[in-house]
Image: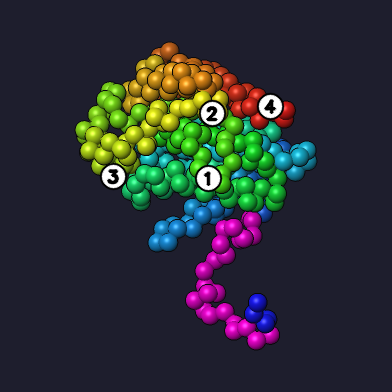
Amino acid sequence: MADPVTAAPPTVRELIPAPHPDVAPLPPAAPREPGVRVLRGVPYGELPGSRPLELDLWLPGADASGPAPLVLFVHGGAWRRGRRDDMGMRMRDWAPGPFARLAAAGLAVACADYRLSGEAAFPAPLDDLRVALRWLTLRSAELGIDTGRTVVWGESAGGHLASLLALTPGPGVPAPVGAVVWYGPSDLTAPRAPFDPHDAGTPEALLLGAAPAGCPDRALAASPLAHAHAGAPPFLLVHGDADTMVSCTHSEALADALRSAGAPAELRVEPGADHGWHGLTDDRVADVFTHSLRFARRLVARGN
């Protein structure tokens, strides 16, 4: 061990970088709605030559008893765009917003960035979510959260990534205890209108770095349908039967595959709903959200 008296002082090159996310001080939590605190823009990962990866954390009030279970939310946007704090177009004008409602119900919510397809190809976004869950576990005592009770929740492309994280959490990462997936793609290998695996210009092709038909192994690895297994956590799959962007057959097929493997899966099909819950009444959108919240709370209840 170096003698602190004789050790050379750090160089300018060593002093310039910001502290690594594993040890960087947490920002102060800002109060929001009654019983809700928010930490914005918290770095959770560093990648050479890339932007820092950040998350927002919505926490129950400071008077909450014990560590809060966690929802790791994954935003949509065709893997090409999107914002970590956006649950979809139908909830953007909610007051309080959906994440504040989850926190008020006793769930911490981490809304994490991930690399988009213009930055890096698959499996980069899935790897980023694994890093986020690792970081949240590392800092869990400071944050007052319990990542051993994590439900991963995603919509559209985020639902696809949430499914993969639940089915393939990776080494050294707490396995999610459940998944809420809204209208997420599950199969990047077979034609499901409007998706064509031979088209190199689709969002799926941009995610993979090539037309899925031209990289079948990578397309299979990126398909939640291929990873269904008996040890999978419970899934809630919600999809509109009039979805013009991601066929409802994606959720139907994943529910069937999970059940066939012996894993629990609930499929809720919304009649007349297009992508993003377009076409549903406000009451039905609120009911989808409430149903999803109840599903998550049931899975993280102590004693389960």
Residue occupying the point 64% across, 56% down: 26
Cα separation, mark 1 vs mark 3, equals: 25 Å
Pointer 1 and pointer 3: residues touching (CB < 8 Å)?
no
Residue indicated by mark 1: 171
Nearer to us: label 1 or label 3? 1
Cα separation, mark 1 vs mark 4, equals: 23 Å
Cα separation, mark 3 vs mark 4, equals: 41 Å
- Identity of the residue furthest to the bottom in this view: 6
Q: What percent of the width, then of the height, locates residue 218?
A: 32, 39
Nearer to us: label 3 or label 2? 2
Residue indicated by mark 4: 304
Tag 2: Cα neighbours inside 10 Å, few (<14), some, or many (≥20)?
A: few
Residue indicated by mark 3: 209
The residues colored magenta run 5-27
Cα separation, mark 2 vs mark 4, equals: 16 Å
Q: Which of the two labelled residues, at mark 3 and mark 4, occupies the earlier sequence position?
A: 3
Residue indicated by mark 2: 231
Tell which of 107 and 98 is nearer to you.
107
Q: What percent of the width, then of the height, locates residue 228?
A: 45, 27
Residue occupying the point 37% across, 37% down: 221
Q: Which amino acid lies under the numbered mark 3 shown in the image of this protein?
A: Gly
Q: What percent of the width, then of the height, locates residue 98?
A: 57, 32
Q: In this view, does 285 lie above or below 3?
A: above
